[in-house]
């Protein structure tokens, strides 16, 4: 009797996460080594690696060849062999030479913080600009490491003319191919930037206001998203649990409908060459009517995390991706208040709202705060609508907040609050039928 073969699960790749740590200046606002290591472990876990070893290695001096000291490399090599580790993540920026030397010494694959984040962004990029920026960053990173990526670099390649002439090595050919692709990508990016205004015009035609969730990774954005929408977006206590943009419609206490958008989490010390790629993945934030800045208020490093988020948003403003008024649209959401005894135990100022996305405490107050911001951003307008233009009246009820309505024999006087974009849409669609009057 024949047997049906059963599928065997591919064993998970075992990884080590190593944080080279130089004693920081006490006067600087830096995060503790353990917190930084935990973040690196979370990043590593988010790409499917199983972390079986993590350690902070104190650096007395940076070694040009390996970054780490000789004794540290030897100790790590023994641990890699003992635990059958296939990937070592060094939570620092490695030069191509350091990366190659560590791989030879440890006998396994080594990736640095930049390479790790590139993998995450590659999965996250959804917009055209985001995809191009990530590919560009990846190629520029790869070009500097070609000496490590190929085993056939000594081979000579024949040819003719000025492209790959006689004697060109494979590494030179590969570097030229990557260089040509980088030039094309930069050209495409420039075209995307030129047409961004058209994209924004298209987003303004979205029928409902957009509320975007931003915040440091693992602050609880996806948990809050699920709590507000009743959706089942993947949410775990790990970094970058959400890599795909997610949008859902929710109804506010006033009856107004808005679209809630979840985004990728922010991280500290983003490598310089990845900043443009990261900002491009946040394009849905650019035209959001309200930005909910979700913070893990119970985290010991919450103030530094807040600074990291605001720094990236300020950079988007400098790049022209965010308008100069974006700060007026931000509501700080102080999440995980349950870890501090409840929202009433959380000290807060201004428009900040303490909540617990897990228990639901504070969510009604947050919804009310969103409603209040929406009203503040709306124009108060009066229209005279003919009685036969029922479609125009229905449109106002669906997209705006009708404050008063007076019915007359031939027309209706309607006082309504509308977003600027909705006012333009309404007057463009029904301008020939209705008459705008003074408030």
Image (cartoon, grey):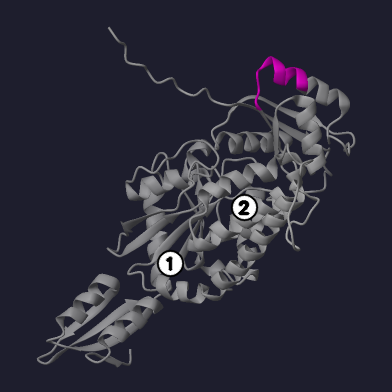
Corner quadrant of residue 317: bottom right
Q: On screen, 262 above or below 393?
A: above
Q: Which residue is mark 1?
A: 373
Where does residue 338 sit, x and y in percent of width and height? 48, 38
Q: Nearer the viewer, mark 1 or mark 2?
A: 2
- Mark 1–mark 2 Cα distance, whole angstroms, equals 21 Å
Report the label total: 2
- Looking at this rendering, what residue extends furthest in the top direction? 1
Corner quadrant of residue 315: bottom right
Q: On screen, 419 above or below 245?
A: below
Mark 2 residue element: helix
Corner quadrant of residue 65: top right
Where does residue 285 sit, x and y in percent of width and height? 50, 62
Front-most of residues 116 and 245? 116
Q: Residue at x 57, y 49 (%)?
A: 121
- The reply, left or right, for residue 283 in relation to residue 247 is right
Mark 1 residue element: helix
Q: Residue at x 48, y 62 (%)?
A: 284
């Amino acid at each position: 009797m024949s047997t049906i073969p059963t599928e065997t699960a591919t064993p998970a790749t075992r990884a080590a996460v190593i944080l080279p740590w130089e004693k920081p200046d006490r006067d600087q606002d830096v995060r503790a080594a353990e917190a930084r290591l935990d973040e690196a472990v979370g990043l590593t876990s988010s790409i499917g690696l199983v972390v079986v070893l993590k350690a902070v290695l104190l650096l007395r001096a940076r070694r040009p060849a390996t970054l780490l000291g000789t004794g540290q490399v030897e100790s790590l090599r023994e641990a890699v062999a003992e635990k059958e580790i296939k990937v070592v993540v060094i939570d620092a920026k490695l030069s191509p030479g350091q990366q190659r030397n560590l791989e030879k010494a440890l006998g396994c694959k080594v990736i640095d913080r930049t390479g790790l984040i590139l993998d995450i962004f590659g999965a996250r990029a959804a917009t055209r600009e985001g995809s191009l920026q990530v590919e560009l960053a990846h190629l520029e990173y790869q070009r500097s490491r070609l000496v490590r990526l190929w085993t056939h670099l000594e081979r000579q390649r024949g040819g003719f003319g000025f492209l790959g002439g006689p004697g060109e090595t494979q590494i030179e050919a590969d570097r030229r191919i990557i260089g040509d692709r980088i030039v094309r990508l930069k050209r495409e990016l420039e075209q995307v930037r030129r047409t961004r205004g058209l994209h924004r015009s298209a987003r303004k035609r979205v029928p409902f206001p957009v509320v975007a969730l931003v915040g440091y990774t693992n602050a609880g954005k996806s948990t809050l998203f699920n709590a507000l929408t009743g959706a089942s977006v993947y949410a775990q206590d790990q970094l970058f649990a959400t890599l795909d943009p997610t949008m859902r419609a929710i109804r506010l206490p006033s009856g107004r409908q808005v679209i809630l958008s979840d985004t990728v989490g922010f991280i500290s010390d983003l490598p310089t060459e990845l900043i443009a790629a990261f900002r491009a993945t946040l394009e849905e934030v650019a035209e959001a009517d309200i930005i909910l800045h979700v913070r893990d208020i119970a985290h010991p490093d919450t103030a530094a995390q807040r600074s990291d988020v605001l720094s990236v948003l300020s950079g988007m403003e400098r790049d022209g991706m965010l308008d100069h008024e974006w700060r007026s649209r931000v509501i700080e959401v102080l999440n995980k208040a349950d870890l501090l005894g409840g929202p009433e135990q959380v000290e807060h100022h201004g428009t900040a709202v303490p909540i617990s996305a897990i228990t639901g405490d504070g969510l009604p107050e947050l919804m009310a705060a969103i409603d209040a911001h929406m009203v503040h951003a709306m124009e108060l307008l009066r229209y005279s609508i003919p009685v036969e233009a029922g479609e125009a009246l229905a449109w106002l009820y669906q997209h705006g907040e009708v404050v008063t309505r007076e019915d007359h024999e031939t027309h209706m006087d309607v006082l309504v609050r509308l977003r600027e974009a909705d006012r333009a849409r309404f007057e463009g669609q029904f301008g020939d039928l209705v008459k705008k009057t003074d408030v």
